[in-house]
Image (cartoon, helix red, strand yellow):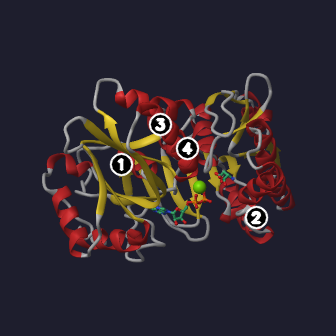
């Protein structure tokens, strides 16, 4: 008998029939004698629908009220799934985030979980019930409803698994595991049996939305055994695990990409100490996260050019701020591009191998893909390219590094 936390994503609970299917699966685990806590997302498309309602009413809605609105999506599915379980003779109870004391900070729309009180859940489990918890939401210390950012139900599940000391956290979704890249872009992509926390974290932060980044860091920190599986097919899925000496180590474990990128450039800035701070300070104050940064010295030697990337949603705001800064600093010109994407190669095996980056650049060049920015770390190489090259770039790299075949070093 084990304690299992399962999370079912939006497509898995997207219709009444699918909710029935999920109830059958949960009932199966329960009947085998396991204690089961289920976390569900809103029905697919629901969070987007709520966001567009808020947009229609308010344009830029107050973050607190947006959270009150968005949290309703998950409240629908916890009730429906609990009903479906009861119909099948499985005692179940649904709870919103605040009801099971998922306490977060007060950063509306991107709150972080601070603590979870497990008493109520343990009591229900002891009484033989399946506990169904709304993903993606919690409440701050004043009782305000908060949400955890897009894809946040993954984090709810992992945090619950950590708090309850579950034997496994299972993330059920519409693919049967973590692949070498998004199988919707590269049909030849290969499912991985295992991937390290470190690699998964890198893949998630570079755009693979199969797991929310915070869920992976949480699982790594609290040592939660984490598995990604399909709701619709049987299989072992992908286990996210610590790097282990006996593990076959692929040079590259995967390719991530991010379509939500935009870049901003300021040219002809007087080159003196403090320039970076003067430029990026106002951007940070506006709560805009900056990803890659490149600074070039202009040919005249006295001025410098700066380029950095931000989330596409922040593009217009960032451009306006930069234009203001440019006027204040006497810079020559500001420009931007919101039709760019980032493609990244990820793999712990890269640490011990030189030449990955140059093979990557060569492969892209052969296909005529122009690289606009580059950034590297020990276990990844990222390039920014024009949006139109996304599919070509990802497929070319998948092919060049032969990711469809398992490779061992
Ligand atoms: P859910 O609604 O279940 O949370 P998501 O849409 O958030 O599902 O995540 C699953 C999707 O992630 C898949 O349908 C797939 O298109 C995408 N994805 C991106 N990169 C990968 C990858 N490397 N492996 C598997 N799926 C990926
Ligand atoms: N419903 C939320 C979203 O669409 C949270 C989640 O599905 O994980 O982002
Ligand atoms: Mg998701």
Do labels 2 and 4 touch, CB within 8 Å?
Answer: no
Where's residue 382, x and y in %? 32, 53
Where's residue 34, x and y in %? 65, 48
Residue 325 drawn above or below residue 404: above
Where's residue 377, x and y in %? 27, 43
The answer as to whether callout 1 falls within 8 Å of ligand 1 is: no
Marks 4/3: CA–CA distance: 11 Å
Q: Which mark is residue 289?
A: none
Marks 3/2: CA–CA distance: 56 Å
Is residue 370 or residue 205 the one in the foreground? 370
Neighbourhood count class around disc 2 (C-alpha, 10 Å): few under 14, some 14–19, many 20 upward: many
Marks 2/4: CA–CA distance: 45 Å
Residue at disc 3, secondary structure: helix
Residue 396 drawn above or below residue 344: below
Q: Residue at x 59, y 42 (%)?
A: 155
Residue at disc 4, secondary structure: helix
Marks 4/1: CA–CA distance: 36 Å
Neighbourhood count class around disc 4 (C-alpha, 10 Å): few under 14, some 14–19, many 20 upward: few
- The residue labelled by disc 2 is 19
Is residue 92 or residue 106 the one in the foreground? 106
């Amino acid at each position: 008998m084990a304690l299992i936390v399962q999370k079912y994503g939006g497509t898995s609970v997207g219709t009444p029939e699918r909710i029935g299917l999920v109830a059958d699966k949960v009932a199966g685990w329960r009947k085998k004698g396991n204690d089961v806590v289920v976390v569900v997302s809103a029905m697919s498309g629901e969070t987007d629908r709520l966001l567009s309602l808020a947009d229609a009413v308010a344009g830029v809605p107050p973050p607190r009220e947006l959270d009150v609105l968005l949290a309703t999506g998950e409240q629908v599915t916890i009730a429906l799934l609990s009903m479906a379980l009861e119909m099948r003779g499985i005692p179940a109870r649904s709870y919103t985030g605040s009801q099971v004391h998922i306490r977060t900070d007060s950063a509306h729309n991107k709150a972080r979980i601070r603590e979870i009180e497990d008493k109520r859940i343990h009591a229900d489990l002891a009484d033989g019930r399946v506990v169904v918890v709304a993903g993606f939401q919690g409440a701050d210390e004043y009782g305000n409803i908060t949400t955890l950012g897009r894809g946040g139900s993954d984090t709810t599940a992992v945090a619950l698994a950590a708090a309850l000391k579950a034997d496994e956290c299972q993330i059920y979704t519409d693919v049967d595991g973590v692949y070498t890249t998004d199988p919707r872009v590269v049909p030849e992509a290969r499912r991985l049996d295992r991937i390290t926390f470190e690699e998964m974290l890198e893949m998630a932060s570079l755009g693979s939305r199969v797991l929310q980044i915070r869920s992976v860091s949480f699982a790594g920190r609290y040592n939660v055994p984490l598995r990604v599986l399909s709701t619709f097919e049987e299989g072992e899925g992908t286990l996210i695990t610590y790097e282990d000496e006996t593990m076959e180590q692929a040079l590259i474990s995967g390719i991530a990409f991010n379509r939500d990128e935009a870049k901003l450039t300021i040219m002809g800035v007087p080159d003196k100490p403090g320039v970076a701070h003067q430029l990026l300070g106002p951007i940070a104050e506006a709560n805009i996260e900056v990803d890659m940064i490149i600074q070039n010295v202009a040919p005249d030697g006295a001025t410098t050019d700066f380029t950095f990337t931000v989330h596409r949603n922040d593009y217009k705001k960032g451009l306006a701020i930069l234009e203001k800064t440019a006027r204040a600093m006497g810079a020559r010109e500001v420009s931007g591009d919101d039709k760019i994407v980032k493609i990244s190669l990820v793999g712990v095996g890269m640490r011990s191998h030189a030449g990955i980056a140059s093979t990557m650049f060569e492969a892209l060049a052969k296909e005529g893909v122009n690289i606009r920015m580059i950034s590297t770390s020990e276990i990844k190489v990222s390039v920014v390219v024009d949006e139109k090259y996304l599919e070509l770039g990802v497929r070319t790299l998948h092919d060049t590094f032969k990711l469809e075949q398992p490779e061992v070093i």
